[in-house]
């Protein structure tokens, strides 16, 4: 069975590129362009994703707000999350890790295939 990854990214071209790359890697990508859309998907879905790929800077909320909201639902709090961002202060990284993120990855320092590999590693650990 394919691993299912919920991708939350507000840059549409990047979101589509992530989806295509995941398909090539035999992953089931659920693409959401906002935090609100991601939570709507989680609420209506019968099965939870194996992992959430979260862009830290979304148009409707940031990574801290997303992680805080995610942890409010008991059934969602066990979903592993990797935060992917263009910036990373020590405080920002520390805060999302305290809220349960498994990894914080800088977009500029990693290729899509490397981030996907990190996601697969977390799913299968």
Image: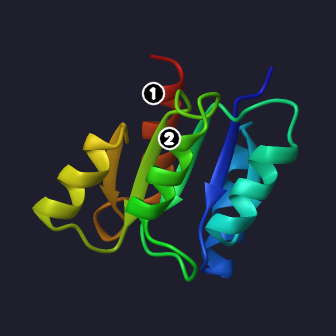
- Residue 63 sits in which quadrant? bottom left
Q: Is residue 20 visible?
A: no
Which of the two marks, 1 or 2, is nearer to us in this view? 2
Q: Residue furthest left?
A: 90
Q: Is residue 111 above or below residue 58?
A: above
- Quarter of the rendering occupied by the N terminus: top right
Which residue is found at the position 31% from the left and 51% from the top? 96
10 Å crowding of disc 2: few (<14), some (14-19), many (20+): some
- Residue 8 sits in which quadrant? bottom right
**Could you give the CA–CA distance between mark 1 and mark 2, rounded to whole angstroms?**
22 Å
Q: Is residue 59 above or below residue 82?
A: below
Dot 1: element? helix
Picture colour scheme: rainbow
10 Å crowding of disc 1: few (<14), some (14-19), many (20+): few
Location of residue 29 in the rendering, given as x and y in whole percent from the top left corner: 74, 48
Q: Is residue 114 above or below residue 58?
A: above
Which residue corresponds to mark 2? 71
**Is 124 in front, or is 68?**
68
Which residue is found at the position 53% from the left and 27% from the top? 78
Q: Is residue 73 visible?
A: yes
Residue 65 placement, left or right of 11: left
Which residue corresponds to mark 1? 121
Location of residue 98 in the rendering, given as x and y in whole percent from the top left corner: 26, 42
- Residue 42 sits in which quadrant? top right
Location of residue 120 in the rendering, given as x and y in whole percent from the top left corner: 53, 31
Residue 89 placement, left or right of 2: left
Q: How many marks?
A: 2
**Is 64 in front, or is 55?**
64
Location of residue 13 in the rendering, given as x and y in whole percent from the top left corner: 67, 80
Residue 53 placement, left or right of 110: right
Which residue is found at the position 59% from the left and 68% from the top? 9
Dot 2: element? helix
């Amino acid at each position: 069975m394919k691993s299912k990854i919920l991708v939350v990214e507000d840059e549409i071209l990047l979101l589509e590129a992530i989806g295509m790359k995941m398909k090539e890697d035999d992953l089931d990508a659920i693409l959401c362009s906002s935090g609100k859309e991601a939570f709507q998907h989680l609420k209506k879905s019968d099965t939870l994703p194996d992992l959430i790929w979260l862009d830290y800077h979304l148009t409707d909320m940031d990574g801290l707000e997303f992680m805080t909201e995610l942890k409010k639902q008991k059934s969602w709090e066990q979903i592993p999350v990797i935060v992917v961002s263009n910036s990373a202060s020590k405080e920002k990284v520390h805060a999302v890790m305290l809220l349960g993120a498994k990894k914080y990855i800088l977009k500029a320092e990693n290729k899509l295939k490397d981030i996907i590999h990190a996601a697969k590693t977390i799913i299968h650990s």
